[in-house]
Amino acid sequence: MAAAERCQFWLPNKRRYCANSPLPSSQFCGNHHSSSSALRVPCPIDPSHSVRQENLDSHVKRCPLRKQAEALEAQPYYSESINAGDPDEIIVSSAAKRSAIYNLSVLEFYDLVDKIRSVHSAAATALQDSYVVPEACEAWLKGQIDRRLPYQEKHVVQQASILGNMEAFGLIGKKIEVVRENANENSEGSDLLNGEEGAVPAVVEFGAGRGYLAQMLADCYGVKKLFLVERRSYKLKADRSLRQNQSLVLERLRIDIEDLNLHAVESLKGLPYLATGKHLCGPATDLTIRCCLRKQYNPRNEFPNNCYLQGLALATCCHHLCQWKHYTNTKFLSNMGITKEEFHAMTWFSSWAVDGDHSCELPDVEEAEKHLAVSETKEADLEGGGIEKIIRSIPAGERAALGFLCKEIIDTGRLLWLREQGLDARLVNYVPSNISPENHLLIAKHRFDM
């Protein structure tokens, strides 16, 4: 169908116009005509699509996602909102965050910038660069892999450095000690207790997407069991290639991390595991931490401790999506004088770190205070222009500097919470910002008494 013959309603998620035919004497189809759009309501099963209000009851009965939702809810590992955080807190939209910032006075805006700078200086961890290229991933880095797999060098470099940091930190590729809580030597998985040289326990990849981090892990480090957690369906997944490895047990869990009780996954019962994730967007990092450390964070105890977290390596990203409701260490922020409203402002500022052109290195955080201090000298000139004018006047480098301060504060809180739970944890830059400005890696393992 020619573009002129299609409905002219733009679908931003699909980046194209609606494919339906328009109504006579109209540019839009029946779904998107102005007379019908006002009568449409989100589907209660999946709000990503809408339906005419008068058809809602019948649609719910035949919605294509209804059976999928019912099948998920029947799974033993499904536990609604088990990892979601404070049930009394609400989700704050990006538009609400922006509106709250624009409603600040000029003095309040600069006071907030000052507070962010002060908190970062007092509490944020100084991130070290840890760009690791492991020998185990050499074939991938040279492109000597199955060419049927989609290959992008920058993604391979990121994945390799995640695995290299895991190896350097003792999570993979070396003798692995195993935590056993209230378990006997005869339980399932005891063959891994001695930490066979080079052996890798089960790996759970959160936010797995197409599964190419898992693919590299399996190819380079010999995983025994692999679990891919992802709520969406993807084409061009690595699953077909992974399933050709007869020594690998692969299971894909199509579920939101918020609802996953990992201890109720039958095939993971009794096994030690590592948790990984590349670019866990916004609150997905916090949900993953809660999921893996359910004993500490979730009061529910329907299942015994069936599986045992050995360590984790989580690449954080999209801090602008973070929410007070989900964040693991609100106590840390409160102790530093950061309120819930200020936290949401910080998350909004954090998007500035990735807005610009990162073909070259950005100013590092040590330079951030100098950049931000320059902007404050403009206050007198912009007093009458409002916050929006002030924000537009801030050069891209200075905006990015403030964004990185906010991202580091947010990730520092996560780091400190892991340490409070007895884990040896670090936060590093695992790739240069010109490869990806989303370059924070949170890596942790249990400490063992020798």
Image: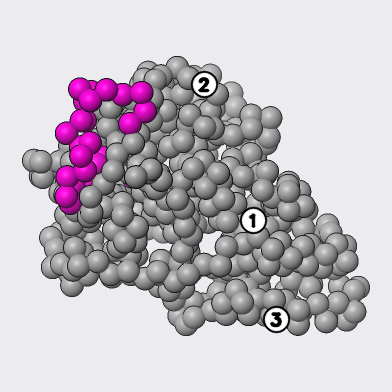
Q: Where is residue 48 in the image (x, y as percent from the top left)?
A: 50, 39
Label 3 Cα crowd, 10 Å radius (few <14 / some 14-19 / many 20+)? few
The correct choice, above or below, for 207 with respect to 186 in the image is below
Q: Residue at x 61, y 45 (%)?
A: 329
Q: Does label 3 or label 2 sit earlier along the sequence?
A: 2
Q: Do we see residue 303 in this rendering?
A: yes
Name the residue carrying label 1: 347
Magenta region: which residues?
180-207
Q: Which amino acid does label 1 sit on?
A: Thr
- State the residue in front, 285 or 429: 429
Name the residue carrying label 2: 300
Q: Which amino acid does label 2 sit on?
A: Arg
- The Cα atoms of the two marked residues, 2 and 1, are separated by 30 Å
Q: Does label 3 or label 1 sit earlier along the sequence?
A: 1
Q: Does the magenta stretch include residue 120?
A: no
Q: Residue at x 63, y 80 (%)?
A: 367
- Quarter holding the C terminus? top left
